[in-house]
Amino acid sequence: MSEPELIFHDTVPLPDEQLEKARDTAIRQRDCVLLYFRDRFSMNFTPVEVWHALNENPVTWGTVIMLNSVRRTITNLTKEGRLIKCDWSERRMGQYGKDNRTWRYNIEYIKPLNARR
């Protein structure tokens, strides 16, 4: 049996109530990021582009999300196979003048049989 999905990384021991709230927030953020990519499945985005889009109208998404949370979520979704890291040639200029890689939705993703969602 595989290990349970780690949505929130508890790097500072939180009390149970705060930990549960942090996990719920991370799940909501994960769902927003995944939905953003899924609804634009033919396009690729940098983490900063996703962060800007989600925070332009937080009421629509139901949450405000930090850039590091977007990056964490994209990393986790890539490990799950739900997102694909695009070729180096598809990178874009980032907010600090450095090239940023892009990701896109994996339209060929098949949910594992033992998946929780």
Image (cartoon, rainbow, N blue to C red):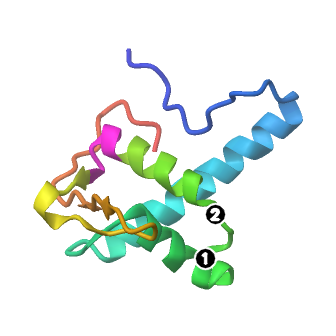
Q: Which residue is mark 1?
A: 55
Residue at x 45% of width, y 19% of height: 3
Q: Secondary structure at mark 1?
A: helix
Number of numbered discs on residues: 2
Residue 5 screen position, x and y as percent: 49, 31
* Amino acid identity at mark 1: Asn
Please state if 38 lies on the left or on the right of 117 as rendered: left
**Residue 101 versus residue 76 in the image, above or below:** below
Q: Is residue 80 magenta?
A: yes
Q: Secondary structure at mark 2?
A: loop
Q: Which residues are magenta?
A: 78-83
Q: Which residue is mark 2?
A: 65
- Answer yes or no: is residue 87 visible: no
Q: Sequence-wise, which precedes: disc 2 or disc 1? A: 1
Q: Residue furthest front?
A: 97
Residue 25 screen position, x and y as percent: 69, 52
* Amino acid identity at mark 2: Ile
**Residue 49 versus residue 66 in the image, above or below:** below
Residue at x 63% of width, y 63% of height: 65
User: 10 Å neighbourhood of mark 1: few (<14), some, or many (≥20)?
Assistant: some
